[in-house]
Image (spheres, rainbow, N blue to C red):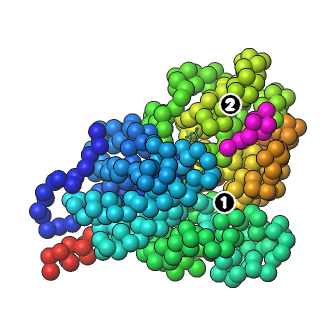
């Protein structure tokens, strides 16, 4: 059941620290914010997590665990105004929006949550003292303002993306650039002693279509809400992208807390905690993990491309043929929206041929749990920041096929800076390709899979580096580590706000 304190008439004058988390209703945003919510609750902050009926049903097992463990946390379900925004009923998450044309409607629907959210928060006891909103929910600025509480922005993407977006916009660097693929050195980075920081380059095409399109209302609102926020919370850790964290902290002009990788929140829990992340897996976990247990250590390639990218039919066939030709065992996730009669028909024969060395999941997979399994030795990924962080946190080397948003920059980070990944070789974001164009061919897949999973010297060195960065990720989240300490400071900040709130209420 959903627990809501709104009817609790507590008349004490002290205001316990109470933070409201407003995620974007998209898996890549909600999952890490839910990790953050539990982390803050574990550290003594009262947390209210905003969700909607469909999203709440997806995370039901987590809500149950939260209540069982008596964490000071409650969930508020706001009805999602699908009909008012012209969306099909139940379309409450980005991955349920049937077509790109309806994306603006989805943002309109979320924006309509402002009034009901404000109403619910006004009645809450203890009263909220601080809000953390996903960057894509700029409308929360007005809600926080009218409640007179502090507001911090949560950034889902990597710091490399956040910093580059900021600094390229600040200096209007792309204004005079005509070749969208011209590589331009990122200004303001300190030397990391390895010359990588000095030579880190990005192009207009790779930094995001979103940044470059003029006159986008939502983009401008996002930027304004970031400017007026009291601080920034980022799901990264200092050692994974040190020069970008340092450079962003210098220019942000406000507190910046790097608190990740948030996926390590439940690393010490049993596997069942990680299995229920985000959604109900379509596969029987026992069967899946029995299969993984039966495979040799580091032998399996995990293939999955996040929640927003839609892999075309032709691409699915190329990926499958490449995996088949590689001879390497694999665990492949095909999303619900990617299923079609052609794909299903083709998979029938494919799965029979591959039965001894493959496991195909059609729908939601327990990704975090899979990546933490010892048999998984590689990850073919679209480089979404959560997937990248999960690979890094588990020491799993990657093959990268970026599609859009921050993914090309994340690729550069793991391929060139961390050197734990092989690029499949895609140079352009998906918007540059025609409907029937297929940028990745079976030979590319076969070649990359063989090099990543093989036992050559380069592959071995890549594995060693991946293990090293995993150790650093764990250290960052453990007591005394950089993210742990930043969370302590964030908690202190929230506590201080609640003291100010108490003074205000009693004076
Ligand atoms: N995820 C999952 N199972 C799936 C697909 C995705 O658990 O079948 C999780 C994945 O572990 C990650 C998030 O969904 O935490 C996807 O976020 P990412 O930033 O990688 O990609 P995006 O959602 O932006 O495509």
Q: Which residue is mark 2?
A: 340
Residue 444 sits above or below residue 104 on the image: above
Residue 315 highlighted magenta (yes or no)? yes
* Residue at 41% from the left image edge and 71% from the top image edge: 141
**SS of the residue under disc 1:** loop
* Residue 383 visible within the image: yes
Tag 2 or tag 1, which sits nearer the N-term? 2
* Residue at 62% from the left image edge and 53% from the top image edge: 101
Specify start and end residues of the magenta stretch as a single range. Answer: 310-317
Residue 107 image position (x, y, % from top left): 51, 59
Q: Quadrant of ligand 1?
A: top right
Using the image as rendered, state which of residue 353 and residue 414 is in the foreground. 353
Mark 1 vs mark 2, foreground winner is 2
Q: Left or right? Give the position of 220 relative to 184.
A: left
Residue 252 image position (x, y, % from top left): 55, 77
Examine the image and state in which quarter residue 324 appears.
top right
Examine the image and state in which quarter residue 167 appears.
bottom right
Q: Which of the image's four quarters has the C terminus?
A: bottom left
């Amino acid at each position: 059941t959903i627990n809501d304190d709104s009817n609790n008439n507590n008349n004490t004058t002290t205001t316990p620290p109470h933070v409201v988390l407003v995620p974007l209703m998209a898996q890549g945003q909600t999952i890490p914010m839910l990790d953050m919510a539990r982390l803050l609750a574990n550290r003594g902050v009262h947390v209210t997590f905003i969700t909607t009926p469909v999203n709440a049903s997806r995370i039901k097992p987590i809500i149950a665990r939260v209540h069982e463990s008596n964490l000071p946390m409650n969930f508020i379900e706001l009805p999602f105004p699908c009909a008012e925004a012209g969306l099909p009923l139940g379309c409450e998450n980005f991955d349920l929006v049937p077509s790109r044309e309806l994306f603006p409607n989805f943002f309109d629907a979320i924006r309509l949550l402002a009034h009901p959210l404000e109403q619910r928060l006004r009645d809450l006891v203890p009263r909220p003292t601080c809000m953390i909103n996903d960057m894509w929910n700029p409308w929360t600025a007005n809600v926080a303002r009218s409640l007179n509480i502090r507001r911090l922005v949560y950034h889902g993407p990597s710091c490399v993306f956040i910093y580059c977006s900021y600094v390229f916009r600040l200096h209007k660097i792309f204004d005079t650039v005509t070749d969208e693929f011209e590589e331009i050195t990122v200004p303001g980075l300190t030397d990391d002693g390895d010359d990588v920081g000095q030579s880190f380059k990005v192009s207009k095409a790779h930094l995001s279509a979103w940044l470059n399109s003029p006159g986008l209302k939502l983009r401008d609102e996002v930027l304004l809400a970031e400017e007026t926020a009291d601080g920034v919370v980022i799901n990264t850790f200092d050692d994974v992208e040190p020069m970008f964290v340092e450079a962003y902290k210098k220019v942000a002009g406000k507190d910046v807390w790097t608190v990740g990788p948030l996926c390590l929140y439940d690393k010490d829990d049993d596997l069942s905690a990680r299995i229920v992340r985000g959604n109900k897996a379509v596969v029987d976990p026992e069967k899946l993990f029995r299969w993984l247990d039966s495979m040799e250590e580091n032998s399996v390639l995990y293939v999955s491309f996040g929640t927003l990218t839609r892999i075309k039919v032709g691409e699915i066939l190329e990926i499958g043929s490449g995996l088949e030709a590689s001879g390497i065992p694999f665990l492949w996730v095909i999303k619900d929206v990617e299923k079609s009669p052609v794909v299903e028909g083709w998979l029938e024969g494919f799965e029979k041929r591959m039965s001894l060395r493959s496991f195909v999941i059609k729908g939601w997979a327990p990704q975090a749990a899979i990546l933490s399994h010892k048999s998984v030795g590689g990850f073919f990924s679209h480089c979404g920041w959560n997937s990248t962080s999960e690979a890094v946190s588990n020491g799993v080397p990657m093959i990268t096929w970026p599609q859009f948003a921050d993914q090309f920059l994340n690729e550069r980070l793991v391929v060139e800076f961390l050197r734990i990944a092989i690029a499949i070789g895609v140079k352009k974001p998906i918007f540059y390709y025609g409907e029937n164009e297929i940028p990745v061919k079976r030979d590319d897949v076969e070649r990359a899979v063989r090099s990543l999973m093989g036992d050559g010297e380069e592959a071995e060195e890549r594995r060693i580096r991946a293990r090293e960065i995993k150790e650093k990720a764990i250290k960052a989240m453990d007591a005394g580590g950089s993210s742990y300490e930043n969370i302590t400071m964030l908690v202190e900040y929230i506590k201080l706000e609640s003291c100010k709130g108490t003074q205000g209420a009693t004076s």
